[in-house]
Amino acid sequence: MAIIVLVLVMSIVFFAMRLLPGDPIRMLVAQSQEVNFTEEQVELLKKQHGLDRSLIIQYFDWLSDVVRGDLGRSVFTNAPVVDQIKQRLPVTVHLGVLAFIISIILGVPAGIVSAVRRGTWLDTVVTTLANLGITVPTFWLGVIMMLVFALYLDWLPVMGYTSPFKDFWESTQKVIMPVICMAIFPIAGNARQTRSAMLEVMHQDYIRTAWSKGLRERVIVTKHAMKNGLIPVVTLLGAGISQILGGQVLIETVFAIPGMGRLAVTSVTSQDYPYVQAIILILATVTLLSNLAVDLFYGWLDPRIRYD
Amino acid sequence: MSNTSLQATTISEAPPKISEWRHFYRVFFSRGLVIFGMVVIVLMIITAIFAPLIAPYDPYELGTGKILEKPSLSHPLGTDQLGRDTLSRVIYGTQTSLTVGLIVVIAAGIVGMTLGLLAGYYTGWINMVIMRIIDALMCFPMILLALVIASLLGGGMRNVIVALTIGLVPIYARLMCGQVLSVKNNDYVLAARSMGAPGWRIMLKHISLNCFPPLIVMMTMVLGATILAEAALSFLGIGIEQPTPAWGSMVNDGRIYLVEMPILSFAPGVAIMLVVFAFNMVGDGLRDALDPRLRGVL
């Protein structure tokens, strides 16, 4: 099923990119330094990029290339798309994985604590922060953090990216702000979801039984409530990955990080078809795989909904 | 004596008879943050409608003061790189955000609910085709989907609205489809069918009306997200075109002068937060009041 959806995604993108207005060759001509492009030269360029053939042939050509791992060449620089992606994907994965881990280790416990201590000041603090977290525009937060921590206080570098294998300390300093910005929305989302899921469980009869047995609160929360309460939270982790990927588009732009998100913005604005298609193919694969992983994990956690 | 007290307890434990509307009213207005959200939304709507009367300057007028003038009495939020009054632009930005947000939420609601209704009512190939396309659209973060569509269509308010609408449709369609599946097996639907009511009549009159409450909650909740997405697109330079005042592009424009004039980026960001926060709070309040399954849980 996932493969059908993936092929569907790619077909929609392929045809949408070509049927909607906008022509990369014309843009290339308009942007280039040479002024006098003749119609013949334009046609030649189209031929070089295979844009003169019928749509259906282009489509199947491209599909068979993709299966063989060839994602095409940039319309503008003629560089193979795979090379750029090989450089940029690790950057995005590095930031994304960090943000994902942080969103779980901060968001889930915060939600549990606020559910267990419902109505106390702790609950108020967590819910207020979580409500602010799903409200703040991440790109704006990035700009403000940059102003405060880099420009005013001079604690962190303003922008850019360094690989952790090259200089671990410098890399860590540079990723702190972007990762916080990317994680803020999923942290808040996880906290809210965990809180509501845990509250629902805490009202159940078996929890009351556990209380009446005289068990300690810690045991009730960790052994009884969390086991069932966290199951719906797992399903939302897939959505968290998608949110982080979406956030990267903005945050990589704010902090000038050479990752996939930045590449998505630049290639989308310049209408570099092969890049846009490749990026979407990769993002869609990541999302589908993560959803599949979540589904499998879910079935393993909760035998009641195991798929037959 | 014991008899009387027993009677008293029984009476006090009987559920008070209050109408649905009064219950809604009571739950909805029981939280301070929800009231705060309502007040902010009303103020924002008034600001948007009466922007020409409230704004001290024309938002498009160049050189209302010096270039990059610090905040003063005549320009409470200073002026931007073209000498335009920032406060006036923030005020007019309300129009842009609310217009885009409302149109997108309603348009996506109509399209998404229709698709969800069809997919849920007619199982079989119709469901299959609609839901697979929805799954495909769901693979992308909304902002990326909107980014691709907006760049294909070009910028401008109309195209941003189209792009965000397409991005939002799947969320509604999924929810509506689930709702329809749970509602359509009710006895009254069976009764209507056995009386020979045509499919469209059952869908419109019997099913869709009963699916509305969660969808209304959803509409309010995604309004905030839509306003955020519009701001994000404008920030990336693919959304609302210059010189129309839009909060997202104002944050981006101000980035260049971040050190000398931080207020240029700061002020529109606060406006975005305020309006999104207000819609989220009202969404939460509506959910508590309308959706009995979640009453009192969050």
Image: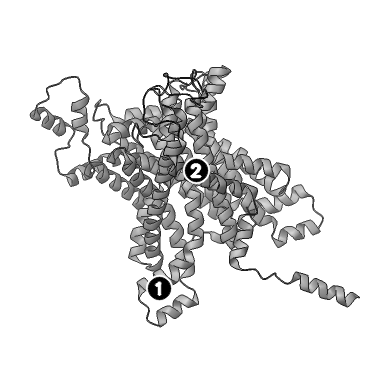
Quarter residue B80 falls in: top left
Identify the element where label 1 is drawn: helix
The residue tagged 1 is: B202
Residue A71 pos. (x, y %) = 29, 35
Identify the element where label 2 is drawn: helix
Quarter residue B174 falls in: bottom left
10 Å crowding of disc 1: few (<14), some (14-19), many (20+): some
Q: Is residue B193 left or right of residue A53?
A: right
- Viewer-nearest residue: B33 or B226: B33
Residue B207 pos. (x, y %) = 44, 69
The amino acid type found where label 1 is placed reads: Ile
Residue B47 pos. (x, y %) = 47, 41
User: Of the residues tagged 1 and 2, which is closer to the observer?
Assistant: 2
**Chain for numbered disc 1:** B
Q: Residue at x 64, y 44 (%)?
A: A127
For the residues marked 1 and 2, what is the alpha-carbon distance in whole angstroms? 39 Å
Residue B80 drawn above or below residue B116: above
Q: Which image quarter is the N terminus of chain B in?
A: bottom right
Tag 1 and tag 2 share a subunit? yes
Q: Residue at x 35, y 58 (%)?
A: B130
Residue A189 drawn above or below residue B236: below
Residue B240 pos. (x, y %) = 36, 37
Q: Residue at x 27, y 36 (%)?
A: A273
The residue tagged 2 is: B44
Extreme residue toward the bottom, this view: B195
Q: Earlier in the sequence, mark 1 or mark 2?
A: 2
Extreme residue toward the right, this view: B1
Quarter residue A276 falls in: top left
Q: Residue at x 82, y 55 (%)?
A: A214
Residue B88 drawn above or below residue B216: above
**Chain for numbered disc 2:** B
